[in-house]
Amino acid sequence: MDLSRRAFGGLALSGIALPGAALSQDLAILDAMRAPLSAPTTEFEAAMAMMIERGNPDMAASLISSMRFSRSRGPQIAETLTALTGEDHFTDWFAWMLWQEQNPQIKPHPDFPTFKRELLLQVDDNFADFLRPEYIEPDRMRIRLEEITWGGVVKDGIPSLDNPALIAAKDADYMRGDDLVFGVSINGDVRAYPLRIMGWHEMFNEVIGGVPVALAYCTLCGSGILFETDVPGRAAPLVFGSSGFLYRSNKLMFDRETHSLWNQYTGQPVVGPLVDSGIALKQRPVVITTWDNWKTSNPGTQVLSLETGHRRNYGSGVVYNDYFASPDLMFPAQVDQRTHQQKDYIFTVRQFGAARAWPLKSFDGMPVINDGIADTALLLVGDPKTRSVRAYERGAHTFAPSGGRLKDEAGAEWRVTEDALLGPDGVSLPRVAGHISYWFAWDNYLGDAATVYGG
């Protein structure tokens, strides 16, 4: 599979027919937006001429949306875009999307929400659950509608695993020792969720150790984040699924109660009824590590069964293997790559009123980092070979590795567990929630409001 960035700009659905495409002599703006996808050639050409004569870049968003789904008319759409914007990216939808992200001052025409909704409902009419007209006006959204992208699947086309079957570690003969897992431990309930399975589902909804949680795994941005789903003020825990939409190459998940769209990376609603709720989902610790490492440290663990109720190839190294091996993104997102490459792995903590990232390569030859975030001193224990990082509060201590354990500044030995650092005389320092992700996702959602270890 060609994973160059332009290979995914043309997920074309040419021939989409939108309603109301007949153009009158006095071309209506909305009809002109529809024309690239539905109008006869003469009317399409008239619409492009009208846009050029009008000369307002507020039509650019609709043209960029149309370019992705109408390859045959791409050159003419590109000519119109160049006339309106002064930019020339020809038919490179990916590049036009990046230009759009870089130019938030250009506001789409007021008819754009109607056009975008019509377009996406032609892909899947179930998208209407998310795109109710009253919620997709610019002043009601926390992200830009023009940057919401179809991810190539319908609603729930990537099905969540809801309270899936688990088996004992000794029965998991399908697992290889070097398979990566998401490891979770809550109140003594220890579980492993293999990435080779979760890559096909990207979401589970579970109760672990008595705590309702959801793991939101965005394969495109390399981040699996464990959220508590029991939100104060709501009668029942939220249950999440995958909407089929992306924003800057990050999945937009949705809750099944209100059908609000949520930013997977921040755990906040961005479109829909919950936008003004003030909800920000609380994170729980999760670690990526190998199956061998996890079951050695946690012999009583349970692990996902292959009996998920879905027919998928759950083999090792199957799902998204080409994407993970490529330096390119599958969907557009502007990235500052002056210091880090877009798919470099980082570990991120967002707590204590701040956010900070540690590049995974910082742990090369240095498995222990004494650092901090805001006014809280942290210890990070990492292994870049297994993509594993755990963070703990360290109080006034400074730690160094010592034969598989840790020694503090006084030479006392400490033990690393999933829940805490355990020291002499029953002293315990709590674990801090964090997660792995690609650099580009951090840069898109937290880059301006956060710090990075090592500059």
Image (cartoon, grey):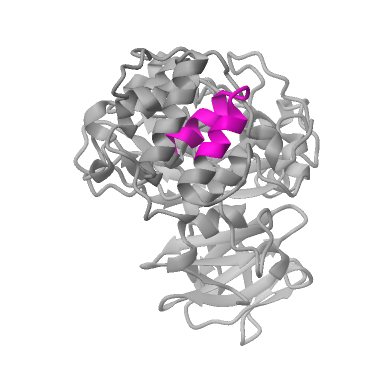
Report whether 281 appears left or right of 378. left
Screen quadrant of the C terminus: bottom right
Q: What count of labels does the image hold?
A: 0
Q: Going 43% across and 39% down the picture, which residue do you hit?
A: 52
Any part of residue 153 in sight: yes
Q: Going 63% across and 77% down the picture, which residue do you hit?
A: 454
Any part of residue 206 in sight: no
The rendered magenta stretch, by its main secondary structure, is classed as helix
Magenta-drawn stretch contains 94: no
Q: Position of residue 197 (x, y in %)?
A: 65, 29
In the foreground, 377 or 363 = 363
Q: Going 64% across and 23% down the picture, which residue do you hit?
A: 305
Give the residue furthest to the bottom.
410
Screen quadrant of the N terminus: top right
Report whether 219 appears left or right of 31. right
Location of residue 113 (image quadrant): top left
In the foreground, 307 or 7 = 7
Q: Give the range drawn in magenta.
A: 61-80
In the foreground, 96 or 212 = 96
Location of residue 114 (image quadrant): top left
Q: Position of residue 369 (x, y in %)?
A: 64, 74
Q: Position of residue 379 (x, y in %)?
A: 57, 71
Report whether 16 appears left or right of 368. left
Q: Where is residue 298 in the image (x, y as percent from the top left)?
A: 65, 45
**Image vertical order of residue 102 relative to residue 34, above or below:** below
Q: Going 72% across and 24% down the picture, which residue do you hit?
A: 314
